[in-house]
Amino acid sequence: MSTSPGRGGAVPAPRPVAGACQGIEDAAAVASQARAGELIEIHGRFTATTQITATGSEASRAQTAGLRCMAAVRSFANGGAGFAYTTDVSSAGLQWAVAAARATRSSAQPPPPPGAKHVDDARWEDSSPALAQFEEAWTAPGPDSEVVLRRSRTSVLHVRSDGVHVGYTEGSTSAVVRRGPRAETAWSRDLRPSDLIELVERTAATDREQPWSLLRHPVVFLGGAGAAITAVIVRALVESPAPVAVDIAARLPSQFRILDDGADPDGPAGGPVDAEGWPTAQLVLAEGGELVIDPTAWGPPSKVSGPRGRAWRPDLARPPVRTPSNVALVADLTATEGEAEVRFEDIGRGLACDSLTFGALSFDAETAAFAVPCSGRLIRRGELTTRRVRGVLQGTVADLVAGILEVHPRSTFVPLVCGVRAVDVLVAHGVAMRSG
Amino acid sequence: MRADARAAAGSDAVAQVCRTAALVAAAVDSAVEPAHWNRFDTFVESRTRTVHTLDSVTGTQTITGEETGAHTRLIAPNGAPLSIAVTGPTHHLVDMSLNQLRQIDGSGHHADGSPSPHSAVRRRQPGREPGADLLGVYLTELGRAVDRVRDVVSRVITFSELHRAVACEHSGDSAGDRQVRRRLHLELRTARGGVGEDGVVLAAGDELADPSVIGPFLDRALRRARMAEVRAAAPEGKLSVVFAEATAGVVMHELVGHLLEADIIASGGTALSDRLGHRVCPLPVTVVDDPTLAERWGSFVVDDEGRPALPTPLIEDGQVCGILSDRTRGSLAGAAYVGHNARRATHEHLPLPRMSNLVMSAGTDRLEDVISDLDSAIYCDGLTRGQVDPAAGRFTLSMTSGRIIRSGHLAESLGPAILTGDVLDVLGAIRAVGDDVDDMQTVCGKAGQQVLVEMSAPSVLISAIDVVRA
């Protein structure tokens, strides 16, 4: 426990959340009040967070402590479903939410079958050291820099009137380092001070970026940029019309696969059970030139087919939707012949892209054409230069995946629209960088 | 619900959050030692939201919910800030705030553990809201009207209503506000793959059944969908771009508004803050952020730090003149106007200087004349995301819909493209400002916080922007 603010005053890890939100222990009792022929589902999340923000220098170190209690209720009866949410997780608040869900019951939706009855899985716990131990890593990151360290711990509770009562705890620690226009993020359930040091080094001052064009040269996407380009591919597989998605999968070289793994505790999304209480599992989106999960399999659970265990909620103010959780572009072991990373000496001239502005992505779902601002360092005569260039990366997702030569997954995930595994990807052709 | 009943419910909601803010503030004040912390302010928010969706594919859905929380900011003698943000039952916000405070400050508090005073919790009765049946009937009728259009293969109609009551206690003064936002939105897809959408904001007193309020929006969505059925690839290079009315508001939002927000300026200066007091547009362009406009998407009476809303000119006659700020960031040398624009996405977030309703004044040019004078250019009538590197002044806008201008006429529709450039270059390249004004409502994201904003602007011709097609 700290006794004073400022440097050296440690922000403690969040306390165990159980018990912090008074009244939620009544959730099962409230659910049990379901009427004849009715199924009541209560999904609660109780999150404690601590955050330290250091801007420029230690003098402007800010601390935040947060506690959030919220529950979402669904009422199923007569073939319909109703939904309501509340932050009043007391017995009275939950009863109001149940009544509100009943009153809004309209959509045709049968109740989901019962999933897991019990979960005992500690793999989603956070084992990172105390935030104070990261202090040395952010010493004097620079006057134009900002370091944000955040730890969160969430208790998830899923109860139903038919006796399902599942609960587990998840936690994570994240670090964001911003320096000027550049930002690097690390997220983990086991973040180490060395990870933060690496982020600080990655955002170290570099040459001013020059506008550049590279029309027919290889591009190496590094780490977070590799995650962002993976997210572009997944977006096309999920949002484009089925024939376009099928074509993309067909052009993905057979030694590569795209996975969605809600059961991977290393990823920021997912969990031992999904938002409907169904056990999670690793799913294949595309493999061997084939699209395994069709775009029509994503959406409201009542309207789509395919395997269960992939219903998630962006927040508790919305009903569950089937959506990717932790995605990854992976290679067969033989595909890279044991190489641990992309060898720049094999590339005469090209771009090592280490920054891709996913938030500014322009994407045409009908054709899977995309354009996205990027920056990186030039590769010349097989060597990575210090010259930073920027432009707009342009192409279609089908051409992009057809040009993938090498994939080297890293151990970390990047939180984007879903969790995406950081990866180094060598694309030999199919994308162009235009000066902009 | 009748209008006077609505007003009464609104004042009750504000009174309740004011009471809760006072309770949390008093409890925190009594729990901290001034040697360790001093409370800066306490913010309490209560919001209820209802969304009705009629989706021709997935069916009808109504979601409703309520959210309440408190955020207390404290400052240590050395200036280090501390925030306590709690979300939960109204009558537990005091206990939850003290609980979090104890975690941070092991020695500073002297809370005796006695039960906290509970505010009376009032909530609407569960069940259908008055008028909900009428709303359902109307939305269903609207859905049937869309479905009667032969080439529409799917549509989603959404009616959303947000009630937000906020209060902020600072230095013993308390101020509250209540914001109500109602919006009807339609998205439809035609058999040839065209997607069109349109929305209409419903002010207090506007009824859904009033054909003058919602009538034209079905036509607009249909027109957009049919225009999008066949799209050519956008041309590339440095091109003249005519931004349609309202769409030009997005340009001003990204290029002007964000670069004059005090937190962004404080993080290293921006291309525009360095030009305060200087002319940046060759034409007498005026851009004002005005949260005081009645019944607009970004309006408020007091900001989320409890200060009264002010209209703030940012550019006046082409000259940079004002900034948007909050209590902690204050003014800036050279700024003739400083807006009270502290806004939070929710009570969990720290307030940041944000835009509200950004209004660009109309010019004198007729859009038809502007287009007829252009030999080859782009007409952009749809922008989604924008990004700007404040210090470098580089921006990126994602064009979602547009048309080619060829020999003075609007020609075929275009596919998506990215528009990039330098802020000062582009503001200096404004060549015409239309006499037509329209507004659009959207959500602005910054530092992980999404707030409702509105842009109102005429059409604008910019003579040179880099275009890269998707």
Image (spheres, coloured by chain):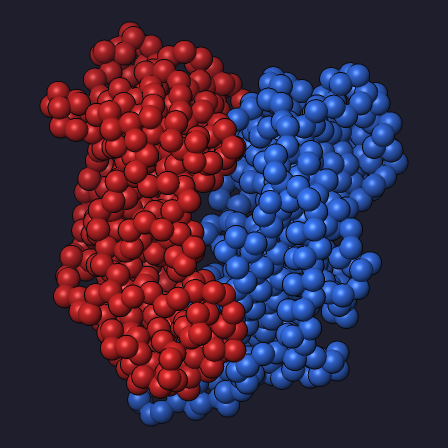
Q: Quadrant of residue B407?
A: top right
Residue that sits furthest to the left in the current view: A338
Q: Which chain is blue?
A: B
* The N terminus of chain B lies in quadrant: bottom right
Q: Nearer the viewer, residue A26 or A288?
A: A288
Q: Which residue is depicted at the point 33% across and 26% down?
A: A250
Q: Position of residue B8 (x, y in %)?
A: 69, 84
Q: Which residue is depicted at the point 39% across and 66% down?
A: A110
Q: Is residue A137 visible?
A: no
Q: Position of residue A331 (x, y in %)?
A: 20, 29
Q: Is residue B410 visible?
A: yes
Q: Which residue is depicted at the point 41% across and 11% down?
A: A216
Decide if residue A16 is on the left or right side of residue A303.
left
Decide if residue A134 is on the left or right side of residue B450.
left
- The relative height of residue A276 versus residue B36 in the rendered view (above or below) is above
Q: Quadrant of residue B237?
A: top right
Q: Position of residue B425 (x, y in %)?
A: 65, 26
Q: Which chain is red?
A: A
Q: Which residue is depicted at the point 19% across and 60% down?
A: A125
Q: Quadrant of residue B13?
A: bottom right
Q: Nearer the viewer, residue B366 or A206?
A: B366
Q: Nearer the viewer, residue A226 or A302?
A: A302
Decide if residue A291 is on the left or right side of residue B318.
left
Q: Position of residue A201 (x, y in %)?
A: 27, 34
- The relative height of residue B437 versus residue A256 in the rendered view (above or below) is below
Count the marks.
0
